[in-house]
């Protein structure tokens, strides 16, 4: 190949090569998720709505202004002259509502509890999204390593197949062995394609969490969590967990709603002050006062009270169930993290060196004619399986560690 041909091939390779993935650290991923994650943005919007409800709940009943005109005759009309000379009866009224039974206070208490629940729900959503982020981030790292291993295996298989072709041409290898190597090369190529598809899927999963449009440009840059990171941190008290505190806030809101429903038995009173001008009856302006109370027996608000009682019982039941689930979750995650750490340690320190030594020995034995091609292919296949298992063990440990840290997170949504 001359210089011109080599330059043309290099330019073509650069044009068809995919764009280089941008390296992304876990800290950068957390910042991007906090700004663009759709679930967290939706929780923040819900919090804003709850704060608006709290402002509305604190508002007292507004005074009501009323203006009216009556006694307009079709025969005589409204009369000639200025406004004060008209024959019509004009009234101007102002009314107030007196809320009894502490309704405004209960409304404010319910709204404030719902704001607390929404705030804690946002923190709990961030806690859960942290778990999803760690799993997606290290899932991408695992997919990158699997893809790299698959491409290396594909390159080595292609080189071995080319060397086998040369040996067949010189008579040093039987054609049947070359055919077996070609079959194994097809399997390696299939594995490389599957790894590439897995890498693409992992990038899209992370991109959705980050609210990122260009998923193909993401690349996990951080190292795997330290192998010694196990469940050594003692969990904080269950009452400090944001999900349980949010459940407690919902119980308080339901209790306030129950008290608000009961307060409806104290009827509100409406007071009014009225100024009336009727030229045909009494000259000048006359004044009047009014008071109105809604009628109805004790059963008038029974339906609302029953609904409020049922909502309160449901909130208490949900809180009790969440507490039981949190207690069981801590015990389960502690043992899961210990098992994942042990599995990773076994793969890295026990099985890894033995598998690598076995493969190197068979490669040397095959080159010297002391091992068959079947033994070599089996050793290579076993090594590829071990590499996949090692990456899976590291991913399982990272996921178990993220779940444990989220389970013991404190009120601000961070790990202790």
Image (tube, grey):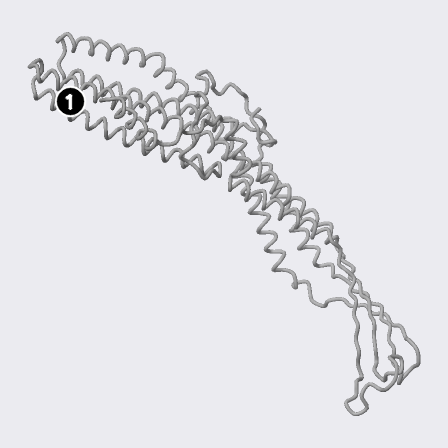
In which quadrant of the rendered image does the N terminus lie? top left
Q: Residue furthest bottom?
A: 75
Q: Position of residue 339 (x, y in %)?
A: 40, 21
At x 51% / y 18%, what residue is drawn? 232
Horizontal placement of 325 versus 16: left or right? right
Q: Circle 1 sits in a helix, a strand or a loop, which is it?
A: helix
Q: How many labels does the image show?
A: 1
Q: Nearer the viewer, residue 355 or 329?
A: 355
Position of 5 relative to 305 (above/below) = above
Q: Which of 27 and 275 is in front in this view?
A: 27
Horizontal placement of 235 versus 182: left or right? right
| Label 1 CA crowd tier, 10 Å (few <14, some 14–19, many 20+) | many
Q: Where is residue 185 in the image (x, y as percent from the top left)?
A: 19, 25
At x 49% / y 28%, what residue is drawn? 330
Horizontal placement of 200 versus 187: left or right? right
In which quadrant of the rendered image does the C terminus lie? top right
Q: Position of residue 411 (x, y in %)?
A: 61, 31
Q: Nearer the viewer, residue 97 or 277?
A: 277
Horizontal placement of 184 versus 337: left or right? left
Position of 307 relative to 292 (above/below) = above
Say which quarter of the image contains residue 156.
Answer: top left
Q: Which residue lies furthest to the right in this view?
A: 283
Q: Position of residue 33 (x, y in %)?
A: 52, 35
Q: Nearer the viewer, residue 29 or 302?
A: 29
- Which residue bears the numbered disc 1? 181
Say which quarter of the image contains residue 67.
Answer: bottom right
Position of 287 relative to 31 (above/below) = below
């Amino acid at each position: 190949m001359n210089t011109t041909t080599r330059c043309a091939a290099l330019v073509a390779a650069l044009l068809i090569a995919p764009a280089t993935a941008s390296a992304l650290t876990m800290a950068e991923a957390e910042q991007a998720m906090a700004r663009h994650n759709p679930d967290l943005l939706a929780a923040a919007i819900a919090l804003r709505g709850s704060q608006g409800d709290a402002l509305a709940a604190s508002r007292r009943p507004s005074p009501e202004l009323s203006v009216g005109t009556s006694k307009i005759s079709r025969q005589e009309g409204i009369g000639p002259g200025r406004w004060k000379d008209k024959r019509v009866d004009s009234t101007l009224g102002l009314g107030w509502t007196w809320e009894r039974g502490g309704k405004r206070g209960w409304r404010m208490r319910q709204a404030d509890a719902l704001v607390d629940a929404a705030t804690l729900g946002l923190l709990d959503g961030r806690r859960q999204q942290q778990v999803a982020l760690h799993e997606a981030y290290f899932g991408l790292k695992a997919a990158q390593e699997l893809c790299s291993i698959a491409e290396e295996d594909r390159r080595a298989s292609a080189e071995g197949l080319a060397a086998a072709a040369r040996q067949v041409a010189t008579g040093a290898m039987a054609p049947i062995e070359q055919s077996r190597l070609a079959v194994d090369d097809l399997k390696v190529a299939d594995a490389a394609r599957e790894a590439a598809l897995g890498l693409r899927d992992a990038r899209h999963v992370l991109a959705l969490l980050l609210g990122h449009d260009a998923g193909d440009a993401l690349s996990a840059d951080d190292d795997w969590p330290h192998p010694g990171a196990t469940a050594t941190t003692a969990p904080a008290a269950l009452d400090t967990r944001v999900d349980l505190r949010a459940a407690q806030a919902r119980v308080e809101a339901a209790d306030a709603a129950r008290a608000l429903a009961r307060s409806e038995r104290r009827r509100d009173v409406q007071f009014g002050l009225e100024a009336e001008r009727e030229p045909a009856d009494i000259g000048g302006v006359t004044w009047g006062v009014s008071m109105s109370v809604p009628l109805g027996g004790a059963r008038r608000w029974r339906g609302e009270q029953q609904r409020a009682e049922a909502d309160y019982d449901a909130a208490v039941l949900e809180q009790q169930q969440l507490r039981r689930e949190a207690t069981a979750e801590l015990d389960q995650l502690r043992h899961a993290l210990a098992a994942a750490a042990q599995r990773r340690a076994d793969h890295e320190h026990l099985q890894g060196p033995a598998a690598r030594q076995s493969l190197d020995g068979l490669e040397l034995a095959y080159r010297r004619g002391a091992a068959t091609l079947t033994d070599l292919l089996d050793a290579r296949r076993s090594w590829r399986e071990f590499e996949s298992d090692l990456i899976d063990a590291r991913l399982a440990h990272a996921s178990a560690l993220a779940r444990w840290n989220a389970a013991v997170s404190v009120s601000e949504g961070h790990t202790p």
